[in-house]
Image (cartoon, rainbow, N blue to C red):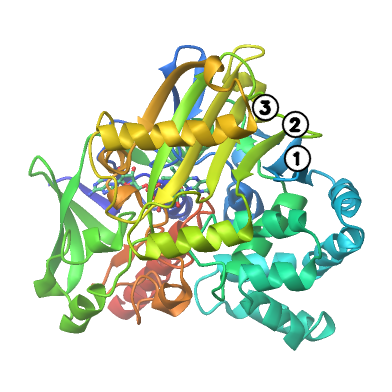
Amino acid sequence: MPTTDAVVIGSGPNGLVAANLLADAGWDVLVLEEQPWLGGAVNSAADVRDGWIHDTCSSFYPLAAASPVIESLQLEHHGLEWVNAPAIVGNPLLSGDWAVLHRDRDDTAASLDALCPGDGDAWLAQCRLWDRLGEQLVGAITSPFPPVRAGLGLAARAPFNGGLAFVRQLLLPARQLGEEAFRGEAPRLLLAGNAAHADIGMESPGSGFMGWLLIMLGQHVGFPVPKGGAAELRRALVRRFEAAGGQTRRRTPVVEVIVSGGRASAVRTGDGEVIEARRAVLADVSAPALYGGLVSWEHLPTKLRRRMDGFEWDPGTIKVDWALSGPIPWAPAPPVAPGTVHLIDSVDALSLAEAQMASGRIPDRGIMLLGQMATTDPTRAPAGAESLWAYTHVPHGALRGEVSDPEVEAMADRMEARIEEHAPGFRDRILNRRILSPDELESRNANLVGGSINGGTAKPQQELIFRPVPGLGRAETPVRGLFLASAAAHPGGGVHGACGSNAARAALAHDRIRLRRSR
Ligand SMILES: Cc1cc2nc3c(=O)[nH]c(=O)nc-3n(C[C@H](O)[C@H](O)[C@H](O)COP(=O)(O)OP(=O)(O)OC[C@H]3O[C@@H](n4cnc5c(N)ncnc54)[C@H](O)[C@@H]3O)c2cc1C
């Protein structure tokens, strides 16, 4: 029987971060990946049109750029080069202006002030708050729960930086935070659009924090992308791992975690091979795929089964990629070209879309997120051309079907029409399009169940000590030697590597205790 110190199931960014940290500690590590490619939702290829590089899933990496975990891996030494767009985020306004998050905070403030006097100072006040508390906040989010060291740092600084008022700000719904902090529409939409990256309602606590975190990250580290495509981030992680002695195997689904004496001792692959894991198994898979799937219920507490009944997926996603002959003909054009564009009519429109989602309907005018990738990184398309994607959310379970399904095609047509409203002539520039329906996303990555991109809802009731279910807020699982390393674990979705790092750190700590006990 082949044997190794640790098996990592799945090669998403969390799996690869975990594998790197274990290999750094001198462990023999084998990563098993179901798909023919490594990287999970961090990938890109010239598969929409020759000469155009499209990211298959994730594209912009503010969380990676700010993550102490990713920084510690020094991926720049393994070929990774970050680039930022001329402007970070833009949202066309119904007035004909643009809300723009510029690279420089003074430029953002000046442009917001020109639209509504006073908003420039209000923006700079938020930036100063971030200067004083942002690093501790990111440290606290990316540490295992409870975040003792970073949490203490935050607790020590908060009283001198607003104290309870700051804590209250973190809890505010995005609508209320926008209305309290700013007077004009533009910064409110920047906040709301970034909040809408997660599935927390505009009227619900938690959405303000999500929006604030992303706009402040955007202002301080940008929304960088790997030069050459998202796959360059994955390549750097794999290169680093292999240089440390790690091994990867593709086209190798794991179908069972073998549990002996209450401990994860091995995994079984799709073709029946059993691979022994002497020290740990780390699962970069979804929570429902692990509990009652790879690990059968007989090895798990009954109460976990009950709690998994309450597990909530985040909404489904439909993504469309276009190879364009030229840039999007925005009319009017933004003052500086943003890499990320949000199409939102108003905060009210987002609230209405959320109500439609909650009642199981596909929203008429929910948020559309766009990535102008050649604007951001000119290596993504031939000179003068654009590599574009857009996605929007649908209720989980909606819009199931092949990419050629008329309902799926009609949704992609509607997305094109939304862009055309702001950019007449957009359709004339389309050379090719690819639709990634919720089912298509799932067929490319088993973690993206029904097109969910976040490993489960980001609502407060499924975060922190409640992620993925109450009582399992850390990477440890009820099975000894088995750790949940995916976005299903705290702190959830996004490419920050923290879930993988937490799982690796837990595996190393438990192994140390085990060794001490066996002496
Ligand atoms: C369309 C889309 C856009 C996104 N945009 C962004 C963005 O711009 N910025 C950002 O920060 N985040 C973004 N995200 C979210 C981010 O990509 C994910 O949160 C992140 O990739 C999660 O990493 P992971 O390692 O937990 O899982 P994944 O990246 O999902 O990887 C899981 C891996 O495990 C493999 N696997 C699953 N089951 C098995 C099994 N049984 N055996 C073997 N292998 C298995 C899968 O094939 C996959 O390779 C986006 C996600 C999607 C889908």
Q: Is residue 306 above or below residue 130?
A: below
- Kindly identify the amino acid type of the residue bearing the numbered disc 3: Thr
Position of 164 with respect to 243 (left or right) is: right
Q: Amino acid at mark 2?
A: Pro
Residue 341 at x, y = what percent? 63, 40
The crowding category of the residue bearing disc 3, from other C-alpha atoms within 10 Å (few below 14, some 14 to 19, many at least 20), is many
Residue at the spot x=29%, y=51% of the render?
398
Query: Which amino acid, mark 1?
Result: Gly
Q: Which residue is mark 2?
A: 332
Residue linked to disc 1: 96
> Where in the figure is residue 213, as x and y percent of width and height?
66, 62
Which quarter of the picture shows residue 500? bottom left
Horizontal side, residue 368 vs residue 282: left or right: right
Q: Can you tell which quarter of the image residue 88 is in?
A: top right
Q: Which of disc 3 and disc 1 is earlier in sequence?
A: 1
The residue at the point 63 percent across, 40 percent down is 340
Q: Can see residue 67?
A: no
